[in-house]
Image (cartoon, coloured by chain):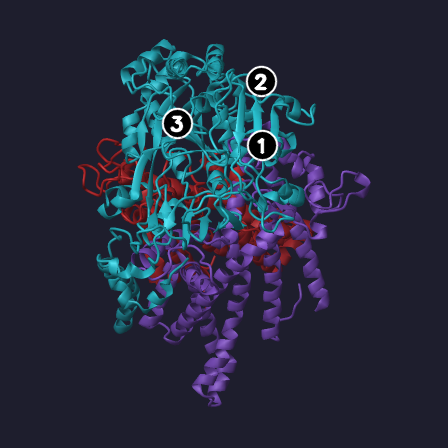
Chain colours: A red, B purple, C cyan
C-alpha cells in the first residue's frame, strides 16, 4: 500500500467529515439497543395513541422523547434498534460481497483461462438484470424473513463491480516484473497472491468496500420500503421509512427521522469512500 | 469492426439465454399463479381450467421448452395450439411470442408495448434533467475550481448521491405536488400534455442521483481536459477562451456519454420505487405488480427486455465512444 | 492560505446552510391541508347527464366475466355493465330488476318462476351492432354457461340445488333439467330440495345474464368484450391501470348518469387520499389512519361522507388439525387474550370489536349471545393452564400473513396480545398468492387472520364457507381453520332447508354460539368503511351489500373551477409565487 496515502487522507476535510458521520452512525448502531429507553416492539396502546388513533407527537407523553409510531411504539427506541439492524445487515453483506468479489476477481485475473471467462460471463449476467427486481423475486422465492436471507441476497447481487475492478488490477500486477520473476523462480501461486497481488489490490478493495456499505444501506432500505425487509415486528430504518411515508401529511417526522439517519450514514460512507479513493489513487 | 460487433452480439445472446433460464426457474418457485390470479374464492375447477388454459399442467421442462419455442406450443389459449399434435404450431420466444400474461389476459408484448412509452418518457425527462444539471454544474465547478462554488456544488453532489428516491419521492409528492399544488399529484393523465406535466416531478426525483454522478464526472474530466497538452497548445496559440472550452468540453463529455448508456439498466430498476410512489403506470410498476401476482410471462418479458436494453446500451455506448474519440480502438 | 481555508469552510457549510434555509422557508410557507372539498357542485336542482366520474381501488380488477369474477372489485366493475334478474335496494331487501317481480316460491318451496321485463336491450354484440332484446333463452344460456365445467366458475357450487345441475355439470345431461323456458319472457327453476338461499343466489353477479354471441364470437377473449344490459357500456380496459365505461343510452331505466366512468386500478390509499383532496378523484372508500381521522372530523366534509360497518367478519383463524390448536382450551385462551378494544384504539376506531361469527346486519347475530368471546386476560391464563401450559407454550408458533401494511399491523397487534399469555408468535409474510395457496391446504398453516365478505344477506353466506366441513378440501379450502364439527354441519344443513323464518334464525344463533364457545376462530373485529365523495357527486349512498356501487350517481356540473375561490384556506398563496404552477393543470 502506498505509504503516502495516510498523509493525503489526513489533509482531506471531506473524508474526515465522512469518517465522523460513519463513526456516529456506527456508534448509534452499536450502542443504540443498549441506550433505547423502551422495548422497541412494545405497543403503548393506551398512552401513545391519541383519541383519533394517531401517534403522539414528540414530548407529548413523558418518557417518550420522539413520540410514537403509528401503533403506539416508542419512536426513539425503534430508531435506535432499527439502526443496529440496518448497519448489521449492511456490514455483513458488504463483508461477504467483498470476500466473494476479491476471491473471484483475483482468481480470474491471476489464473485467466476458462474459469476467468465463466466468472466474467456471470458478472455480465448479473449486471444485465435489474437489481431490485431480482432481489424482490429471490426474496419471494426464499420466503423467509430472517436477517441472513437479506444479507445473502444483498451480497450475492453486489460483488460484481468489485470483482471486475480487482480482476483488472490483478491483471496489471501479474505482468509486473518482480511478479513475473517470482513466478519464473517457481514461487508458489498462493504465496505470490498473498505477498504481491493482495497488497496491490487492497486499495481499490477498501475504497469500493466503503462505498458498497453505502449502497447496501440504500438497497436494504429500498427492499424494506417495498415491504420485503426485516422480520416484523422488528424495525429497520427502511421499514420505519415505509411506515412513516403514509402519515407524511400529518406527521412528517415519522418519515424524516429514519430518512435523516439513512441519508447521514450513506453520505458519510460516500464521503469516506471518496476520501480513501483520493488517498490511494491521487489523480492530481 | 464488424467482427467485433458480431462477437459482442454473440456474448449478448449467451447472457440473454442465461437470464431467461434463471428467471424462468425463479418464477416457477415463487408461488402458484392460479391462486394469485383467481383470488381467495377459487375452487378446484377454476384452478384446473386456469392451469389447462395456460399449459401450467405440463411438467416444468416441457413448459420451458414450449416457452422457448423449440417444441410445439403448450398453451391451449395461444391461437396456434391444436388438439391434434401433428398440426400443432409453435408459440415461443424463437417465434417472437412472449406468451400471455395471466393477470392481463393479453399478449405480454402488447402489455409491455403499452407500458414502455411511459417509462421511456419518464426516462427521457430524467436523462434531460440529469445531463442539464450534471453537465452544467460539473463545468461550473471545474471552472471555479476550489472556489466556494466548486465546494458547494461538490458537497451537494455527494449529498445527492445519498438521497434515495423513497425519501425524496414522498416529500416531493406531498409538498411540491399536494400542499403547494405545483404539480399534479401522481398518476399519468390522459392527454400528451398531461403526460408531460405528470412526468416532471417523478423524472426530477429519478434525476437527482444521475445528476450528482454526472456533475462529479464532468468536473473531474473537465479538469483533466483543461490541463491536457492540446488545450494548453490551443491557449498558447491564442485561441479564444470560448473555443478552448468547447474543445475541452467535447473531450470531457465522453465518459458522461458512456455512463448515460450504462444507465439504461437503472431506468427500469431505478424507476420501480419512483413509479410506485407516484402511481406512474410504467414498466417498473408493471414489474412489481407482476411479481406480486406471480404473473410469470410478464416478469419474463420485462426482464428479457431490460437485459436486452442493457446489452444494446453497452454496445451503443462503446460505439459512441469510438465514434467520438478516434484514439479508441474497438478491441477486446 | 488563510483566505483559502476560510473559503473552503464556507464552501462546506454554504450548501448545507442553503438547503436548510430553503427547507425552512418552504416549511414556513407550507399551506395547510385543504380543510374541505376543492370543488362544489353548481347547484343544479334536477339530475342531469354528463361529466366523468373517477373512482379507484388499491388493487386490480380480475375479470369482467360475471360468471367467473368473484371479488369485490370485479363486482364493482361488473355491476356497471351487467344487471341481474334481482337486486337489492338500499335497505338490503331483494327487489326485482330485470325480472318484473320477485318470484314467490311454490307451495313445496321448490319452484321459482321469473318473468322478464320486456324491451331490455343488450349493448352492441357481434352480429348485432345495435344490440338485441334480452329474452328468457339468454337466462338459460347463462345458467348453462355458469354450470359448465370448462367455464371454471367459482360460483357454480351455489347453484347445485337446481334439479339436474349435477348431471349437467358432469356432462351426463345436455341441458339442466330444472331450468325451463316457458315463453319468450318466462323462465322457471325447479330445485331438487327446498333452499332458502336460492333467491339470494339468483341475485349474485354469477347469474347476471350474458349473451351467447359474445362467447361464441370471442372465445377466450370474451372478457375483453363484456356486453350486458347494464347502465354503462364497456369502453376500454388497460389491465392494472384503468377501466373506462360509457353511458348506455338505451338502458331500460331512465335516469341521469355521468357520460363516462373511469375506474383507476392500483392506486395506493395514501396517494388516493391526496388526489381526492385535490379534486382529482370523485370518491374514496379506504383511507390511511391519518386521512380517516381528517375526513371524519372535517366539518366541510360532513355532508358527503358516511361511516358504516361492512358486512364482513374478521378473526384469528387457528388450524384445528394442528397441535396445539386441536385443544379447545388453547383456542379459548387465544380468544380471551385478544384485546379487541386496544386493537380498535390502535386502528383509530376504524374497526368495531366483536366476539361472534356473524356481523350485526345479518340474521342470527345476537347481541346477548351467551358465549360471545371477549377480552379477559385472567380467563385466558386459566384456559392456558387447562390446556396444560400454565407457564406458556414452549414452541414458537408461526403466523402467516399476506403482505400489505394493514395485514402487518394486525399481525403485530396479535403478536403482543399472545405474548402476554405466554404464546410466542413468529410472523411470516408471504405474497397474497402464496398465502391463499398454503392456507387452503390442510395441516399447513397454524395461525392466520381470517376474513370473509358477504355474498348474500343470509347467515349461510358466512357460516358455510368458513366452518362447514364440506369446505374443508385438500386444496383451496375456504374453511381455512379446517374446522370440522358434525354437529355444526348438521345444524347448518338443517337451517338451510328450514322454511320458518323464526326457527331458522334460532338455528343460526345456536350455530353462532357453538362456534364462539368452541373458539372455532378468535372472532376479533368488524371493519368499518368510511366513504367520502365530492360534494358535486349526487345521489350516492353507500350500499349495504355492494361495495362502492356507483351506478346511480349523477354529477352536478359544471363544477370545474368554481374551485379556486373556494380555497379560503391559503392553499393558493404559494402557487402565486411559483410560475411552475402552470404545470399543475387539471388532470382528468
Residue closer to the observer: C238 or C330: C238
Query: In terms of depth relative to the viewer, which is nearer, A71 or C354?
Result: C354
The residue indicated by pointer 2 is C192
- Foreground of the two, B284 or A282: B284
Give me the residue at 41% from left, 33% from top. Answer: C545
Left or right: residue C394 compared with residue C473: left
Q: Are marks 3 and 1 in contact (CB under 8 Å)?
A: no
Q: Which of marks 2 and 1 is in front?
A: 2
**Residue position marked by numbered label 1 in the rendering:** C153
The x and y percentages for residue B267 are 51, 57
Q: According to the image, label 3 marks what residue?
A: C313
Which residue is painted at 72% across and 51% down in the image? B94
Tags 2 and 1 both on a single chain: yes
Disc on the earlier residue, 3 or 1: 1
Q: How far across and how far down the image is residue A20, in percent?
A: 32, 53
In terms of sequence position, does the residue under pointer 2 or pointer 1 come before the other? 1
User: Percent x, y for residue C423?
Assistant: 37, 21
Q: Quadrant of the C terminus of chain A?
A: bottom left
Amino acid at each position: 500500500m502506498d505509504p503516502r496515502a495516510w498523509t493525503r487522507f489526513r489533509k482531506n476535510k471531506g473524508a474526515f467529515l465522512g469518517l465522523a458521520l460513519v463513526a456516529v452512525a456506527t456508534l448509534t448502531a452499536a450502542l443504540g439497543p443498549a441506550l433505547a429507553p423502551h422495548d422497541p416492539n412494545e405497543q403503548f396502546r393506551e398512552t401513545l395513541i391519541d383519541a383519533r388513533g394517531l401517534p403522539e407527537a414528540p414530548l407529548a407523553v413523558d418518557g417518550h422523547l420522539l413520540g410514537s409510531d403509528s401503533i403506539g411504539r416508542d419512536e426513539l427506541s425503534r430508531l435506535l434498534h432499527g439502526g443496529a439492524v440496518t448497519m448489521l445487515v449492511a456490514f455483513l453483506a458488504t463483508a461477504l460481497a467483498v470476500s466473494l468479489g476479491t476471491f473471484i476477481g483475483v482468481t480470474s485475473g491471476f489464473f485467466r483461462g476458462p474459469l476467468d471467462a465463466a466468472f466474467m460471463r456471470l458478472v455480465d449476467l448479473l449486471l444485465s438484470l435489474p437489481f431490485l427486481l431480482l432481489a424482490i423475486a429471490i426474496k419471494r422465492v426464499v420466503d423467509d424473513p430472517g436477517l441472513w436471507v437479506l444479507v445473502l441476497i444483498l451480497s450475492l447481487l453486489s460483488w460484481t463491480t468489485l470483482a471486475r475492478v480487482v480482476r483488472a488490477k490483478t491483471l496489471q500486477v501479474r505482468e509486473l516484473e518482480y511478479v513475473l520473476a517470482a513466478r519464473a523462480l517457481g514461487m508458489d501461486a498462493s504465496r505470490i497472491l498473498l505477498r504481491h497481488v493482495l497488497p496491490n489490490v487492497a486499495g481499490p478493495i477498501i475504497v469500493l468496500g466503503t462505498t458498497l456499505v453505502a449502497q447496501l444501506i440504500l438497497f436494504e432500505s429500498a427492499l424494506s420500503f417495498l415491504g420485503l425487509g426485516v422480520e416484523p415486528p422488528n424495525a429497520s430504518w427502511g421499514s420505519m421509512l415505509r411506515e412513516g411515508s403514509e402519515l407524511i401529511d400529518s406527521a412528517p417526522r415519522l418519515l424524516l427521522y429514519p430518512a435523516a439517519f439513512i441519508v447521514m450514514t450513506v453520505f458519510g460512507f460516500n464521503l469516506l469512500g471518496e476520501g480513501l479513493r483520493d488517498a490511494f489513487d491521487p489523480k492530481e | 469492426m464488424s467482427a467485433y460487433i458480431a462477437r459482442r452480439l454473440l456474448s449478448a445472446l449467451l447472457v440473454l439465454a442465461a437470464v431467461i433460464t434463471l428467471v424462468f426457474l425463479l418464477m416457477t418457485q415463487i408461488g402458484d399463479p392460479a391462486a394469485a390470479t383467481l383470488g381467495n374464492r377459487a375452487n378446484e375447477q377454476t384452478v384446473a381450467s386456469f392451469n389447462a388454459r395456460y399449459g401450467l399442467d405440463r411438467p416444468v421442462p416441457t413448459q420451458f421448452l414450449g416457452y422457448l419455442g423449440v417444441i410445439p406450443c403448450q398453451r391451449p389459449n395461444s391461437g396456434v395450439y391444436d388438439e391434434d399434435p401433428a398440426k400443432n404450431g409453435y408459440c415461443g420466444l424463437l417465434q417472437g411470442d412472449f406468451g400471455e400474461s395471466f393477470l392481463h389476459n393479453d399478449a405480454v408484448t402488447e402489455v409491455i408495448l403499452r407500458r414502455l412509452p411511459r417509462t421511456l418518457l419518464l426516462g427521457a425527462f430524467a436523462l434531460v434533467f440529469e445531463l442539464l444539471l450534471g453537465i452544467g454544474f460539473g463545468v461550473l465547478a471545474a471552472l471555479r475550481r476550489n472556489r466556494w462554488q466548486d465546494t458547494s456544488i461538490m458537497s451537494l453532489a455527494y449529498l445527492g448521491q445519498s438521497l434515495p428516491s423513497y425519501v425524496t419521492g414522498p416529500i416531493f409528492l406531498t409538498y411540491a405536488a399536494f400542499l403547494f399544488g405545483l404539480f399534479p399529484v401522481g398518476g399519468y393523465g390522459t392527454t400528451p400534455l398531461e403526460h408531460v406535466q405528470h412526468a416532471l416531478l417523478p423524472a426530477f426525483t429519478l434525476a437527482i442521483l444521475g445528476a450528482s454522478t454526472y456533475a462529479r464526472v464532468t468536473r473531474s474530466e473537465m479538469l483533466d481536459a483543461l490541463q491536457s497538452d492540446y488545450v494548453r497548445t490551443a491557449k498558447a496559440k491564442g485561441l479564444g477562451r470560448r473555443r478552448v472550452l468547447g474543445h475541452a468540453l467535447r473531450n470531457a463529455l465522453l465518459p458522461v456519454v458512456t455512463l448515460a448508456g450504462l444507465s439504461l439498466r437503472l431506468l427500469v430498476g431505478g424507476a420501480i420505487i419512483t413509479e410506485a410512489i407516484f402511481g406512474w403506470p410504467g414498466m417498473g410498476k408493471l414489474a412489481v405488480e407482476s411479481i406480486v401476482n406471480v404473473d410469470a410471462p410478464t416478469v419474463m418479458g420485462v426482464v428479457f427486455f431490460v437485459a436486452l436494453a442493457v446489452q444494446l446500451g453497452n454496445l451503443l455506448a462503446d460505439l459512441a465512444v469510438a465514434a467520438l474519440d478516434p484514439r479508441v480502438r474497438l478491441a477486446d | 492560505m488563510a483566505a483559502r481555508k476560510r473559503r473552503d469552510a464556507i464552501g462546506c457549510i454554504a450548501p448545507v446552510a442553503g438547503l436548510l434555509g430553503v427547507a425552512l422557508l418552504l416549511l414556513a410557507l407550507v399551506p395547510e391541508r385543504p380543510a374541505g372539498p376543492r370543488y362544489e357542485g353548481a347547484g343544479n336542482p334536477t339530475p342531469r347527464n354528463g361529466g366523468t366520474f373517477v373512482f379507484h381501488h388499491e388493487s386490480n380488477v380480475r375479470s369482467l366475466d360475471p360468471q367467473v369474477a368473484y371479488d369485490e372489485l370485479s363486482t364493482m366493475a361488473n355491476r356497471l355493465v351487467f344487471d341481474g334478474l334481482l337486486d337489492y335496494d338500499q335497505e338490503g331487501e331483494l327487489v326485482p330488476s330485470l325480472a318484473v317481480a320477485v318470484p314467490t316460491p311454490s307451495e313445496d318451496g321448490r319452484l321459482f318462476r321469473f318473468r322478464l321485463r320486456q324491451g331490455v336491450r343488450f349493448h352492441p354484440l357481434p352480429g348485432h351492432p345495435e344490440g338485441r332484446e334480452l329474452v328468457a333463452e339468454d337466462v338459460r344460456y347463462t345458467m348453462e354457461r355458469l354450470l359448465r365445467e370448462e367455464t371454471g366458475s367459482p360460483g357454480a357450487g351455489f347453484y347445485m340445488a337446481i334439479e339436474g345441475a349435477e348431471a349437467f355439470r358432469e356432462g351426463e345431461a345436455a341441458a339442466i333439467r330444472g331450468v325451463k323456458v316457458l315463453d319468450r319472457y318466462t323462465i322457471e327453476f325447479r330445485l331438487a330440495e327446498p333452499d332458502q338461499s336460492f333467491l339470494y343466489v339468483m341475485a349474485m353477479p354469477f347469474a347476471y345474464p350474458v349473451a351467447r354471441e359474445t362467447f361464441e364470437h370471442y372465445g377466450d377473449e370474451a372478457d375483453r368484450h363484456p356486453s350486458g344490459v347494464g347502465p354503462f357500456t364497456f369502453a376500454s380496459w388497460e389491465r392494472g391501470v384503468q377501466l373506462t365505461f360509457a353511458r348506455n343510452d338505451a338502458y331500460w331505466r331512465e335516469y341521469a348518469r355521468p357520460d363516462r366512468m373511469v375506474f383507476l386500478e392500483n392506486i395506493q390509499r395514501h396517494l388516493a387520499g391526496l388526489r381526492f383532496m385535490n379534486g382529482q378523484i370523485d370518491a374514496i372508500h379506504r383511507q390511511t389512519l391519518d386521512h380517516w381521522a381528517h375526513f371524519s372530523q372535517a366539518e366541510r366534509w360532513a355532508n358527503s361522507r358516511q361511516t358504516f360497518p361492512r358486512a364482513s367478519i374478521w378473526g384469528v383463524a387457528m388450524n384445528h388439525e394442528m397441535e396445539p390448536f386441536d385443544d379447545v382450551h388453547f383456542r379459548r385462551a387465544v380468544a380471551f387474550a385478544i384485546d379487541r378494544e386496544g386493537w380498535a384504539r390502535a386502528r383509530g376506531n376504524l374497526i368495531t370489536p366483536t366476539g361472534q361469527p356473524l356481523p350485526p346486519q345479518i340474521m342470527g347475530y345476537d347481541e346477548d349471545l351467551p358465549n360471545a368471546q371477549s377480552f379477559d386476560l385472567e380467563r385466558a391464563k386459566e384456559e392456558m393452564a387447562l390446556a396444560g401450559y400454565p407457564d406458556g407454550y414452549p414452541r414458537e408458533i408461526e403466523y402467516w400473513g399476506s403482505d400489505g401494511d394493514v395485514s402487518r399491523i394486525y399481525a403485530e397487534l396479535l403478536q403482543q396480545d399472545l405474548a402476554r399469555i405466554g404464546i410466542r408468535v413468529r410472523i411470516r409474510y408471504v405474497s397474497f398468492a402464496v398465502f391463499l395457496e398454503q392456507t387452503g391446504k390442510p395441516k399447513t398453516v397454524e395461525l392466520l387472520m381470517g376474513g370473509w365478505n358477504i355474498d348474500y344477506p343470509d347467515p349461510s353466506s358466512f357460516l358455510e364457507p368458513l366452518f362447514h366441513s364440506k369446505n374443508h378440501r385438500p386444496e383451496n379450502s375456504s374453511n381455512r381453520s379446517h374446522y370440522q364439527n358434525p354437529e355444526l354441519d348438521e345444524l347448518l344443513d338443517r337451517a338451510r332447508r328450514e322454511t320458518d323464518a323464526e326457527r331458522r334464525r334460532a338455528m343460526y344463533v345456536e350455530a353462532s354460539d357453538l362456534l364462539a364457545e368452541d373458539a372455532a376462530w378468535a372472532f376479533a373485529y368488524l371493519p368499518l368503511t368510511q366513504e367520502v365523495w365530492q360534494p358535486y357527486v349526487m345521489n350516492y349512498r353507500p350500499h349495504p351489500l355492494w361495495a362502492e356501487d356507483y351506478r346511480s350517481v349523477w354529477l352536478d356540473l359544471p363544477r370545474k373551477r368554481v374551485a379556486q375561490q373556494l380555497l379560503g384556506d391559503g392553499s393558493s398563496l404559494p402557487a402565486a409565487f411559483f410560475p411552475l404552477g402552470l404545470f399543475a393543470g387539471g388532470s382528468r
